[in-house]
Image (cartoon, rainbow, N blue to C red):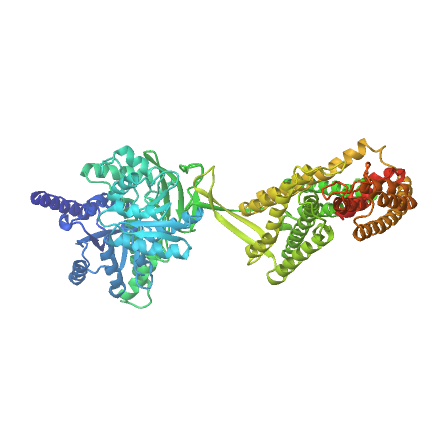
């Protein structure tokens, strides 16, 4: 290795000697001493960049020699200074060179960032200007401190600017940054973080892996980073993408953006850590690489008389003869030679003209003035070089940065960023993504508002309108039609109250489900209150009418009890409505309803797994909605349960009504209860989904109303339609009712008189039996019969039959055990006479002992009147 190093050093000395002396042999020109600082020593531990860029500089010197004056009149002479990438050694060597002479006006080169930073800081004090062809760190962009440094290669700050523009172009605002350790890349990272912060790009992950790159990438994946910005040297590319392949950090969900400041593509043709070439290419496929434009895109000849392609061919031929590797800096070094040559020749000509044509003789220009002139000449430099237009703005080279996308195994130029205009141009026809669209920087969350569609609202509202029309029609016929009034079972206002409840609950459907976007908050709250009131009051009124009717049947046919005040429909409905009103008014005053926006949990999109849908909905609610609903359910629930129990008890009872039976009544109560419980459950389960909530709740309400109408009023209309001829006309019915009522009154008065006579006879017989128990039975029988005949023949025959025997023996004394003994006769009278007395009381359904035609003809009418009186 030592022998190889000595040979390499000797070869470099020969190359530099020819570079310095070769052009001078052909023509004697004015020398321009320039100090060349480069780490060309083989022992520096770095790649020998001097051998790679020396052919480009030699080509530049040859082209300068062929130029006309003033460029052709001057010769650039280099004095080499090995920096060894050590700032202290470089600064000492610089001072030694300046002390030994000759007088240097310009410093050329400077590749190591640490050396360039230190020397550039001291240039103003030394009256020197430095022209470099290497990328300068972002920290050197401070022109107040580093105003004498110029480079033909754009700074790393321009790469960061291009990266930010690319992120903004595709609206990527969440990124992760992984940076290889090193002075230059660390400086790039700091500047990138500042620019990302300024552009409001959120950096979720930022790390510089030292040894284990895979661990850093694993942590990056755990943070759900989709856009990965990589800053690493070319020799680390394969290792990074090998870890990315293992961790599955590639594909349509990830986008890599890599920048290293170079100008050549990557070489992924070797195996690293067990990854095959195909695996590396698969992981790196689609990666966008930002690099400096090494050659101009113009096909016209520049200042040197050659096109960029002609220069590159010449450079490759020179390089092939020497056997060196291609350097990414060769074209910038070539243009740097033209910058310093133009600036120096321009200053020298200016100084020569000033000394020659000055009015004062023997005048000389001061070094400070020469330095200012040289600084201004470099600033104003502008020409067409092999890397494109060469000019400076604020000391920075303006050029273009290429965007190269790796597609398969080759790189495709998909855009460029102009540092002069700060514009990014993307060729969309060439840019390809793994997915159907650019990669998302996060899981896409779509906000979706749920509301009742116009079609659904129209369908449900139309059904509600039909139900309202039907109910209103039935109510009108019930109130106005005399035939339907005849079929009012146990009469009263129960039918009207039931229909009123159905109307209110059906009307609640129309005020719900309106589009919230078309309504103001105040109007929306009013409609919410209207919906609550109509539904709650309608339910109470309708169910109260059914419950009282069911309870009446239960009292008559199951418990055999007399009617109670519970069967008075008006009182039950009144109490329920008052209770509803109290709860609802308290709710509206203490905790009023208002519009509330509900945000639901995220849901994945079925069409795209990388898309989440966040649903929003609006509903009327209050702080303690659950508490108020519990209060409403607290008194309605037990009432529904009691109604079901009573309905189940009367399911097989016989109701004396031509159009309604107990099964239909029980079924109606069961239906209202089932629909009510289903509505409450459906409301709780679908409250997060307004369309489903609107459809389920209102459908249950309408189905309940239509079912109740069908069960309670359908049979009536069918009966009226089929038996309309059997029902009397209203005028005839009223006349017959009045006549029967008058006859009934007269008949009742007669019965009362007969009852009084029977009472007197019973008392007389009882007294006679008590006074003389041993009297003759025939005499008693005769007297009793005679008194009875004087009063009423019918009564006489009955009493005599009870007291007397058909076969009486007056001569034989009666024994206590004889059937006609006074004891037995008294016992029979005490039992049979009350029965005879109560047989004339129609209130218990008794019949007359006589064959009166008047009472027999009115039996059915009396029974109907009694049934009506009892139930009411």
In the rendered image, which quarter contains the N terminus? top left
Residue 762 in the figure: left or right of residue 90: right
Front residue of 42/585: it is 585
Front residue of 204/72: it is 204
Front residue of 778/798: it is 778
Residue 647 appears at what percent x and percent y? Answer: 64, 42
Q: Residue furthest front?
A: 811
**Compared with residue 489, is residue 622 higher up or lower down, i.e. above or below?**
below
- Answer with the quarter of the image where residue 120 lies: bottom left
- Answer with the quarter of the image where residue 147 lies: bottom left
Q: Residue furthest bottom?
A: 360
Residue 685 in the figure: left or right of residue 377: right
Residue 866 appears at what percent x and percent y? Answer: 79, 45
Which residue is painted at 60% across and 50% down in the image?
A: 638
Which residue is painted at 21% across and 54% down in the image?
A: 37
Residue 107 appears at what percent x and percent y? Answer: 24, 56
> Does residue 65 appear anywhere in the picture?
no
């Amino acid at each position: 290795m030592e022998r190889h190093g000595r040979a390499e050093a000797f070869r470099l000395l020969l190359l530099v000697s020819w570079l310095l002396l070769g052009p001078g042999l052909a023509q004697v020109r004015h020398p321009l001493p320039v100090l060349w600082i480069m780490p060309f020593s083989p022992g520096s531990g770095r790649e020998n960049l001097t051998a790679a860029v020396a052919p480009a500089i030699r080509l530049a010197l040859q082209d300068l020699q062929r130029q006309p004056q003033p460029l052709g009149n001057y010769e650039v002479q280099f004095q080499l200074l090995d920096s060894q990438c050590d700032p202290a050694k470089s600064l000492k060597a610089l001072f030694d060179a300046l002390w030994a002479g000759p007088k240097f006006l310009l410093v050329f080169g400077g590749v190591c960032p640490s050396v360039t930073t230190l020397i550039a800081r001291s240039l103003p004090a030394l009256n020197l200007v430095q022209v470099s062809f290497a990328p300068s760190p972002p920290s050197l962009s401070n022109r107040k401190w580093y105003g004498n440094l110029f480079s033909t290669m754009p700074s790393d700050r321009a790469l960061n600017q291009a990266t930010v523009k690319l992120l903004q172009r595709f609206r990527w605002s969440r990124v992760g940054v992984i940076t290889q350790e090193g002075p230059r890349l660390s400086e790039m990272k700091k500047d990138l973080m500042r620019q990302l912060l300024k552009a409001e790009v959120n950096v979720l992950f930022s790390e510089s892996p030292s040894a284990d790159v895979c661990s850093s990438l694993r942590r990056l994946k755990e943070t759900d980073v989709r856009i990965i910005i990589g800053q690493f040297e070319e020799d680390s590319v394969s290792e990074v993408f090998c870890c990315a392949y293992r961790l599955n950090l590639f594909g349509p969900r990830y986008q890599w953006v890599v920048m290293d400041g170079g100008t050549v593509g990557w070489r992924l043709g070797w195996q690293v850590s067990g990854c095959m070439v195909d695996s590396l290419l698969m992981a790196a496929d689609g990666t966008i690489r930002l690099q400096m434009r090494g050659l101009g895109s113009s096909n016209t000849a520049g200042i040197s008389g050659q096109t960029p392609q002609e220069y590159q061919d010449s450079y490759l031929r020179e390089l092939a003869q020497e056997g060196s590797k291609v350097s990414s800096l060769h074209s910038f070094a070539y243009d740097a030679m033209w910058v310093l040559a133009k600036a120096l020749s321009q200053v020298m000509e200016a100084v020569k003209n000033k000394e020659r044509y000055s009015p004062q003789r023997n005048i000389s220009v001061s070094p400070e003035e020469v330095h200012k002139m040289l600084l201004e000449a470099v600033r104003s430099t502008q020409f067409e070089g092999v890397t494109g237009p060469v000019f400076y703005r604020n000391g920075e080279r303006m050029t273009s940065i290429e965007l190269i996308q790796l597609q398969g195994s080759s790189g495709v130029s998909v855009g460029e960023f102009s540092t002069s205009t700060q514009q990014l141009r993307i060729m969309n026809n060439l840019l390809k993504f793994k997915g159907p669209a650019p990669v998302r920087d996060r899981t896409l969350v779509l906000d979706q508002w749920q509301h009742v569609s116009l079609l659904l609202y129209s369908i449900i509202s139309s059904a509600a309108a039909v139900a309202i029309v039907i109910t209103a029609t039935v109510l009108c016929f019930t109130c106005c039609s005399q035939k339907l009034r005849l079929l009012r079972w146990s009469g009263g206002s129960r039918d009207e109250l039931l229909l009123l409840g159905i109307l209110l609950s059906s009307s609640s459907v129309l005020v719900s489900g309106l589009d919230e976007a078309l309504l103001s908050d105040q109007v929306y709250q009013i409609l919410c209150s209207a919906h609550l009131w109509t539904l709650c009051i309608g339910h109470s009124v309708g169910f109260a009418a059914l419950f009282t009717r069911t309870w009446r049947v239960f009292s008559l046919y199951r418990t055999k009890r007399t009617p109670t005040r519970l069967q008075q429909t008006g009182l039950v409905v009144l109490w329920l409505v008052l209770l509803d009103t109290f709860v609802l008014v308290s709710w509206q005053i203490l905790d009023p309803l208002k519009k509330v926006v509900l945000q639901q949990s995220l849901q994945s999109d079925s069409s795209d797994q990388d898309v989440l849908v966040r649903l929003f909905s609006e509903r009327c609610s209050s702080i303690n909605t659950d508490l108020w609903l519990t209060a409403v359910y607290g008194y309605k629930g037990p009432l529904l349960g009691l109604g079901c129990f009573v309905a189940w008890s009367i399911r097989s009872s016989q109701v004396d009504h031509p159009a309604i039976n107990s099964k239909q009544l029980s079924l109606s109560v069961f239906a209202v209860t089932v629909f009510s419980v289903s509505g409450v459950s459906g409301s709780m389960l679908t409250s997060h989904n307004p369309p489903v909530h609107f459809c389920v709740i209102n459908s249950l309400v309408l189905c309940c109303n239509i079912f109740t109408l069908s069960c309670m009023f359908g049979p009536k209309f069918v009966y009226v339609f089929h038996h309309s001829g059997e029902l009397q006309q209203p005028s005839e019915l009223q006349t017959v009712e009045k006549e029967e009522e008058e006859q009934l009154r007269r008949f009742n008065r007669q019965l009362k008189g007969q009852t009084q006579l029977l009472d007197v006879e019973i008392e007389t017989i009882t007294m006679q039996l008590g006074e003389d128990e041993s009297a003759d039975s025939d005499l008693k029988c005769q007297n009793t019969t005679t008194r009875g005949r004087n009063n009423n023949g019918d009564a006489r025959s009955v009493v005599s039959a009870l007291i007397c025997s058909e076969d009486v023996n007056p001569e034989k004394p009666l024994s206590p055990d004889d059937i006609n003994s006074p004891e037995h006769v008294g016992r029979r009278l005490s039992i049979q006479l009350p029965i005879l007395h109560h047989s004339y009381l129609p209130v218990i359904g008794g019949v007359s002992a006589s064959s009166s035609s008047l009472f027999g003809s009115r039996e059915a009418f009396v029974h109907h009147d009694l049934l009506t009186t009892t139930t009411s």
